[in-house]
Image: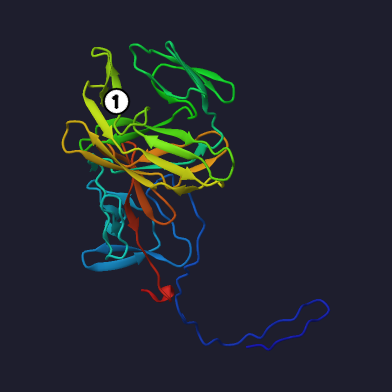
Amino acid sequence: MTGASAPQDNLGGTNPKQIGLGTGVASIDLLFTDGSVQSTGKNTDFCLSGNGLFVVKQGNQTYYTRDGAFEFDSEGNYVLPSSGLYVQGWTATDGVLNTSSAVGNITIPAAKSMAAKATTTAKYANNLNASVPTITKIVAGTTTYDETTKGTAKIDGNTVKSATITLSDGTTVTETSGSYTIGYSLHVTMTVTAYDSLGTAHSIPVYFTLTGKDTTGKTGNTWTISVNSDMSDKNSHYDSTKKAFVDGIVEADGSTTTATMAKQELKFDTDGKMKSGSGTITMTLTNGSGADQKVTLDLSTITQYAGKSTINASADGNVAGTLSSVSVDSSGIITGTYTNGVKQTEAQVAVAQFTNASGLT
């Protein structure tokens, strides 16, 4: 209708006015770049970062969405509550995920229970003190042992009720139980808690004793591991009625549990690493509640450096429990926490990726 004009002294340039050809929608594109992340305060919500979509399903129809506002319904189904669509992923079996299988509905009942599980493995970790002092003198009752006479003193609770022990660092301690040998260290005692098939906990003391001190710095130290302080293969306790040591550990309910394990020597290199002796030992528990229980002690990661003994044990097995809460992590794994203190993987949310996500309807 008018042409363009150049700028003038009191007016800027103008574009031409002309009849248009109309407008049309070329395309509608979905943008899959990340939006801003917002905390919702709900531990069942997810958001996606990067290229991906959640998979949800209704019957045989599958849908994909960026909406991660998920919840558990009254039957424990993990759903998109705005539509009731089931969130897809993998549900764990006894805490084990198999993500190579087909995805399916995720269901975690609110009152889900965990059965009691017997202990099969206890793993020892951390350090034994390479510079632990050794025993140089023992006064037990009327008997004295020293580096010349050698010998072992056993506190029997009857004729010998205590022993005064002098160590190579000059310190003196008084012990009221156990057996002690000139040239050995005091026992480093680490209790392992083992559960039987009913979920009853049994506290079993395991003794680590330095029995071969390397004074040359060339061969390394030797430790002996046993279930009794006298380094025998079966634990025992003092029976005040019988005035003698009898096999087993007296439980809180009055029953007796006996731990049997062949004592084993553990040899360490001068660099503090274990060089010989089995990394695993089998302990047998007998408590009258069924068949003997086998527990494997894994010692393969123990070190021996100068400094404080920090050795500790962690075992599998548990008492029965009920699911109390769930949490999620950045890989989509849902973890359940039970009233027995055990945390267990429950499920993992699946994520789908498309080369051209904007091409989806």
Question: In this rendering, is residue 58 above or below 23?
Answer: above
Crowding at mark 1 (Cα within 10 Å: few <14, some 14-19, many 20+): many
Outermost residue, front side: 148
Mark 1: amino acid: Ser
Image quarter where the C terminus lies is: bottom left
Q: Nearer the viewer, residue 291 or 199?
A: 291
The location of residue 39, given as percent across then percent down, is 47, 48
Left or right side of 149 for 100:
left
The location of residue 127, given as percent across then percent down, is 50, 39
Q: Looking at the image, which residue is at 35% across and 62% down? A: 350
Question: In this rendering, is residue 200 above or below 294?
Answer: above
Q: Nearer the viewer, residue 21 or 297?
A: 297
Q: Nearer the viewer, residue 51 or 206?
A: 206
Q: Which residue is label 1 attached to? A: 236
Q: Looking at the image, which residue is at 49% across and 82% down? A: 23
Q: Looking at the image, which residue is at 44% across and 29% down? A: 187
Image quarter where the N terminus lies is: bottom right
Left or right side of 299 for 253:
left
Q: Looking at the image, which residue is at 35% across and 48% down? A: 335
Left or right side of 182 for 171:
right
The location of residue 152, given as percent across then percent down, is 42, 24
Colouring mode (rainbow / by chain / secondary structure / one colour)? rainbow
- From this viewpoint, is residue 117 visible? no
Which element type, helix, strand or loop, lies under badge 1? strand
- From this viewpoint, is residue 308 visible? yes
The quadrant holding residue 178 is top left
The location of residue 51, given as percent across then percent down, is 45, 67
Outermost residue, right side: 9
